[in-house]
Amino acid sequence: MNIGLIIILVIAIIVAIFSGLNAALHWLLWVALIVAVIALIAFLLRVIGGRNRA
């Protein structure tokens, strides 16, 4: 997996955790989920595309 996608996924998880702890920032949960879905789709497109970088 591309290192950039890993970083995006980690940030999305961290934002999801913090938004879960603070109800006032509940909208961050949706932002985190959207970013995580985008990162997952980008990863799946790379895997399905079969582009292997050595």
Image: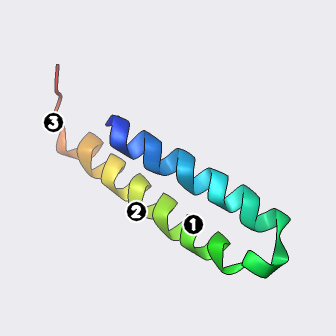
Q: CA distance from mark 2 to mark 1?
A: 9 Å
N-term-proximal mark, 1 vs 3 = 1
Say which amino acid is labelled 1: Leu
Q: Return the x and y of residue 46 as percentages of the image width and height.
A: 25, 44
Asked where in the image residue 2 lies, by quadrant, the reply is: top left
N-term-proximal mark, 2 vs 1 = 1
Foreground: disc 3 or disc 2? 2
Say which amino acid is labelled 2: Ile
Q: Is residue 47 above or below residue 37?
A: above
Which element is circle 1 on? helix
Q: Return the x and y of residue 16 as percentages of the image width and height.
A: 67, 61
N-term-proximal mark, 3 vs 2 = 2
Q: Is residue 3 above or below residue 10?
A: above
Q: CA distance from mark 3 to mark 2?
A: 19 Å
Q: Return the x and y of residue 10 as percentages of the image width and height.
A: 55, 45
Q: Residue drawn at (55%, 51%), measured in percent from left and top?
A: 11
Please state if 29 lies on the left or on the right of 54 as rendered. Answer: right
**Residue hosting label 1:** 33
Please state if 19 lies on the left or on the right of 37 as rendered. Answer: right
Q: Quadrant of the N terminus?
A: top left
Q: Residue drawn at (43%, 53%), measured in percent from left and top?
A: 40
**Residue 38: image tag:** 2
